[in-house]
Image (tube, grey):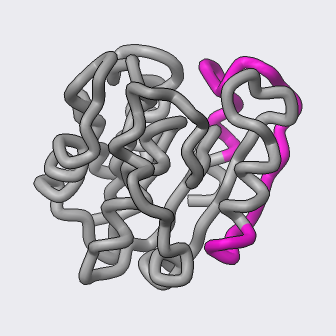
Amino acid sequence: MKRVIIIHAWWSSPEQHWYQEEKKILEGKGYRVDLPKMPGDQWPKLDDWLKVIGDLKPDENTTIIGHSLGVPAALRFLEGFEGKIDKFFSVAGFAEDLGIEETKSFFEKSFNLENIKEKANKFIILNENKDPYVPLERGRELAKGVMGEFIEVEGNIHFDKMDLNLINSRL
């Protein structure tokens, strides 16, 4: 069975943004969708997020969609993952420390993008060109590092809302 795991943004929840709408659309298309509440709220810890992702047991039939801090969390998971997933979507994602004290545990070492790029059949990187939190260049760098498709989207709302066809047309 095809499945999707959505890893929400920092200081967020499965009930916010576009997550529930996407879950409903994908379930209507026959996907199993996991949308866990990530722990830590204001002070997230990488190890806690990695446990949640690992407990979901992604496999070759899995697509992971990360939003904002959900992207580096999922990238860290893939870095240590022994298997391979089908697709990885980065929404307002990045693989470098943005200088936010509360999220430092996610960036204690550099990402091994050479390793990570082998862990998914396809990477799709979506970043807004005027995102107030994640510079567009961070998305471009991530796409280059994982040999992924880069999609620049007009906007400045950090994908709080989004055209879900950007994902659904590429599943």
Q: Quadrant of the C terminus?
A: bottom right
Number of callouts: 0
Left or right: residue 11 compared with residue 49: right
Relative depth, front residue between 168 and 100:
100
Residue 161 in the magenta stretch? The answer is: yes
Instruction: Look at 34% across and 49% down and name the residue there.
Output: 5
Q: Is 11 in the magenta?
A: no
Residue in the foreground of this view, choosing between 150 and 135 = 135
- Residue under the point 85% across and 27% down: 130
**Residue found 25% across the figure and 37% down from its top:** 45
The x and y percentages for residue 113 are 54, 74
Which residues make up the magenta segment?
144-166
| Image location (x, y in percent) of residue 22 | 48, 33
Judge left or right: residue 15 versus residue 167. Answer: left
Q: Is residue 48 above or below residue 101?
A: below
Q: Is residue 122 above or below residue 17?
A: below
Q: Residue at x 42, y 78 (%)?
A: 119
Q: Kindly tell me whether residue 142 is visible in this rendering.
A: yes
Indicate the quadrant containing the N terminus: top left, top right, bottom left or bottom right. bottom left
Viewer-proximal residue among 46 and 38: 46
Picture quadrant where residue 76 is located = bottom left
Residue 165 drawn above or below residue 161? below
